[in-house]
Amino acid sequence: MLQDDIRRFIRYGKARFSLSEEDALFAQNAVLALLGQDALPDGPEPEVGADLGPDEAVRPLLEAALEGGTERERLPLLEAALFGCLLPRPSEVIRAFAETEAGEGIRAALDAFYRQCIDSNYIRMGDIRKNIEWTAPAPKADLVMTINLSKPEKDNKEIARQRSLPQSSYPKCMLCAENLGYAGRLNFPARQTLRFLPLTLGGERWYFQFSPYVYYPQHCIAFSAEHRPMKIDRSTLVKLLDFVDRIPHYFIGSNADLPIVGGSILSHEHFQGGGTEMPLQKTALRRPFAVVKGVRVGVADWYNSVVRVEGEAREAVLEAADAVQRAWRGYADPEVGVENSPAQPHNTVTPVACRRGKTYRLDLILRNNVTSPEFPDGVFHAHPEHHNIKKEGIGIIEAMGVFILPGRLQRQCRAVAGVLTGRPFDPEDPDLAPHRRMVEQLTARHGTALGQEEAEAVVRQFLDQTCLDILRNTAVFKEDEKGQAHFDRFLTAAFGPEKGENR
């Protein structure tokens, strides 16, 4: 019965969010209103076990709403509203975080906040667990591969319908503070379950939230309280270092501020980070370049072009990293395809900060967004032969070695594996047609008589190698002798011709 399901949902809120009796009554009446119910007769309060997840708690209410005439497309909006009834107000979340941090430390406070985001289904862990994830062995540091199934593909009718809906400029984007508590609409997600924490970065007001998509453990976003475009300069580096001073066990980084090499949102300044060690961060130096005022500068042993700056003196690390990003902004090297000019700037960096004990580290991934007739999507972007696997921009997460691949690959790779086991190649099959070149390569190498498991392993190895090749595509200085010589030429331009321990 719906009445029992409502009681169970409220009991879930009391168990997960420590609702007082009074807050539980308030939430109960808000839930009744959302479901079009006038009353909740007396009845026994159900037990809620520790294993009851948010999906199980809310599903009966959504099914009842669907049976009562609610459109299926509106169920996500209703779900967020229902969980929003259970959650503490934003100020209470901030106060509870501060109390936990004061008593148990920043790790415990973040863990509790993360758990709350999962329990409220803001982080839809039930969907995220559907993602297919594996580690791809690679020579410098292994890559992490994910086929993203937590965001289902929309059909053409739904896309057309959303395009026909009235457009709104509120909130200005999905990162604005005005999303807090927003009820959403069919073409904009509901955010009644969003909670964020205030931060001070670079002397400015920023906010911290967890990403609802969590591509890795405790995937977080820090965003400016002001809606303003992405920008990489010295102040960006200051903010990143402020962040790791505030949360020293996290890394934090910024997408680049130019199209093609930037992230999906260039209109709102924000960073991404989290409580994990990314593949790039597991690497050592390929070679040291110099020690500048006690700060080590060198080339990270990675697949794209990364300048690593590290040392215990924060200000010296900042100055050395700023010297790199300023020099790169104005640098050009046509011999290796790095086109750039003041009239048409193409250079920027993707900076990433972390701390290792007392040591600050800034990894500066050099980016260039020039295009050419051969590479209209970007010279230092995934090359066309890889677009069947990954065509989207290579932002900070993938540049650091965590690849988020489209959900279509689950069925497409299954179809390719089928050809390797003897099924005929159908050029009209929409799952096979984009992968004709891939099929030709794999059948030439492995034939068409593999077992199912062996065929799937072969296809997965192809994905692994493709993503490694894409990272190498993005390297502005290739790993060969010529590329590395030109890399050193750039570092010399950034720090001067004298090499040694006391620059």
Image: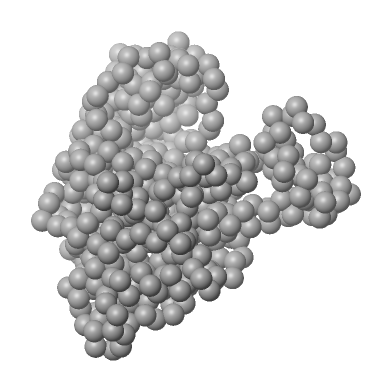
Q: Which of 53/251 is in front?
A: 251
Let me know if residue 97 appears in the view.
yes
x%, y% of residue 152? 53, 32
**Left or right of 179 on screen, residue 300:** right
| Relative vertical location of residue 22 with respect to residue 302 in this rendering, above or below | above
**Left or right of 298 on screen, residue 485:** right
| Relative vertical location of residue 377 with respect to residue 134 in this rendering, above or below | above
Query: How many numbered markers are drawn?
Result: 0
Q: Which of 50/249 is in front?
A: 249
Residue sitting farthest toward the top: 69
**Left or right of 146 on screen, residue 218:** left
Residue positioned 46% across, 62% down in the render: 335
Let me know if residue 3 appears in the view.
no
Residue sitting farthest toward the left: 203
Residue positioned 27% across, 75% down in the render: 495
x%, y% of residue 19? 26, 40
x%, y% of residue 377? 49, 42
**Left or right of 234 on screen, residue 111:** right
Quarter of the picture containing the C terminus is: bottom left
Residue positioned 40% across, 32% down in the render: 8
| Relative vertical location of residue 67 with respect to residue 371 in this rendering, above or below | above
Q: How is the image coloured?
A: one colour
| Relative vertical location of residue 426 with respect to residue 454 in this rendering, above or below | above
Residue sitting farthest toward the bottom: 501
x%, y% of residue 421? 85, 45
**Which of the 4 image quarters holds residue 118?**
top left
Residue positioned 31% across, 18% down in the render: 167
Q: Which of 476/493 is in front?
A: 493
